[in-house]
Every structure is written in structure tokens, then in C-alpha cells.
Amino acid sequence: MKIAPIDVAHKSFSRKMMGADTEEVMDFLRIVADEMEQLIRERNEMRETLREKELQIIEYKERDDLLKSTITTATKMSDKIQTDAEREARLILNDAKQQAEMIVRDARDSLKKIYGEVTALKNIRMQFENNLRAIVQSHITMLDQGNQMMPSPEFAAGDLSFSTEPHAQRDSATSSTMATDAEHQVIKDKVAQAVSRATHSQVEM
């Protein structure tokens, strides 16, 4: 049975002979009632404080759960970002390697093609120079053969022993033959110089 302070303060007792002093009993009951009231008040305050602390604990727990959830989400996002970044970096690196290999391959193919074209041009030039040299040599040979087959000035002017032509005519024929020989020699020298220059250019290449 619950007893309130007011119940203690107004509690009445039956009287008996030689019993306790009624005033003293009532004073004591009032003191007890006051103490009970004070204890009840303190208990209620403590309950209120406890309830507030419990609410704070619940709030802190909710914050802690939210913080843990945020940390977990951030960790997952960080892991995902790192994974995506690593994958993207690998893709970029692989693409760069492929492009570099393609550039090197194209450069090698172009260089090989250029070498082939240069070699072909050198061969064409060499063939042309050989043909030119052969043609020039053929013309030089023909000039030499023409000089050998050309009659001497004396025979061109008539018999040496029995010639009746004037000396002036024989001298003119001799001069004409010498001029022709000089022209042939000039042509041969120019051709030889051209062949020499072509050969020198071939060596420099």
C-alpha cells in the first residue's frame, strides 16, 4: 500500500491508557511527512533528469548511427571512386600504349617506304647514269672512229707527189681538219666532265 506524506501527517491513532504523548506523536509524524515529501520531490527530479539523460542518450545513439552510416557510405563511395579511377587510369594507359605502338608502327612503315623510294630513286639514277655513260662512250667511240676514217689533208687535196693544187689550198684543208679535231676534243672533254660530275654526285648520295 502506497502512503503519501499527507497520509502520514493526518494519521490518527486510538488512545489507550498510559499511551504515548499525542502531541509528540503528531509532531514526529509531521516531520516524517516532510521528509517523505522531500524524498518524493527529489525522486521526481531524479526521474526527470534520468528521462532527459535517456532522451540525450537516444539522440546521441541516433547521431552515432547516422555518423556510422555516413562513414560507411563515404567509405563505400571512396572505394568506388578509387576503383573507378584505377580502372579509368588503366584504360587511359592501355589506350596511350596502343596509340604509341600505332604511331611507332606507322613511323616505321613510313620510314621503310621512304628508304624503299630512296633506294629505287638511287637505282633509277644509277641506271640513268650508266645509260648516259654508255651513250656518251658510244659517241666518243664514234668520234674516234670518224677521225680515224677521215682522209689526211694530203689525200684530201690530192696526191702528195704529183699534186698540182696550190699550197694555199692544201694549207686550208689542213687547217679545216685541225679545227674539226679540236672541236671533237672539246666535245670529248665536256662529256668527260659531265660524266665525272654525275659520278661524283652518285658517290655523295
Image: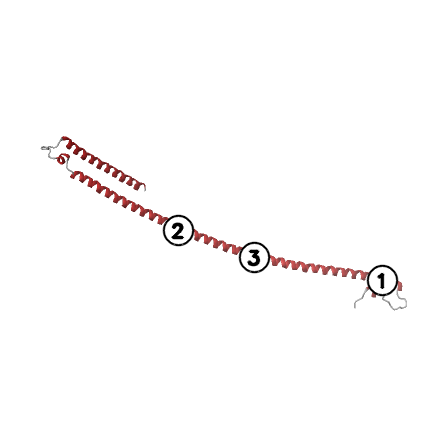
Instruction: Name the image quarter holding residue 33.
Output: bottom right
Left or right: where does residue 66 sit relative to residue 145? right
Mark nearest the camera among 1 and 2 is 2
Determine contact: label 1, label 2, CB under 8 Å.
Answer: no
Vertical placement of residue 96 versus 5, above or below: above
Q: Looking at the picture, which amino acid does disc 3 mark?
A: Met
Which residue: 31% across, 46% down?
Answer: 121
Color encoding of the figure: secondary structure
In terms of secondary structure, where does tag 1 sit? helix
User: Which is more N-terminal, label 3 or label 1?
Assistant: 1
* Residue at image mark 1: 30
x, y percent for residue 128: 27, 45
Which residue is found at the position 63% from the left and 59% from the top?
66
SS category of the residue bearing label 3 = helix
Amino acid under label 2? Asp
Residue 188 image offset from top left, x and y in percent: 23, 38
Using the image as rendered, state which of residue 3 and residue 83 is in the foreground.
83
Which quadrant of the figure contains the N terminus?
A: bottom right
Instruction: Check disc 1 and give the amino acid type.
Output: Arg
Q: Nearer the viewer, residue 66 or 178?
A: 178
Dot 3 crowding, Cα within 10 Å, few <14, some 14–19, many 20+: few
Q: CA distance from mark 1 to mark 2?
A: 111 Å
User: Which of disc 2 and disc 1 is earlier in sequence?
Assistant: 1
Q: Residue 27 lies in what quarter of the image? A: bottom right
Residue at which label 2 appears:
106
Q: CA distance from mark 1 to mark 3?
A: 69 Å
Q: Secondary structure at mark 2?
A: helix
The residue beneath circle 3 is: 77
In the figure, is residue 93 to the left or right of 65?
Answer: left
Question: Which residue is painted at 41% across and 52% down in the image?
Answer: 102
Residue at the spot 54% in from the left edge and 56% down from the top edge: 81
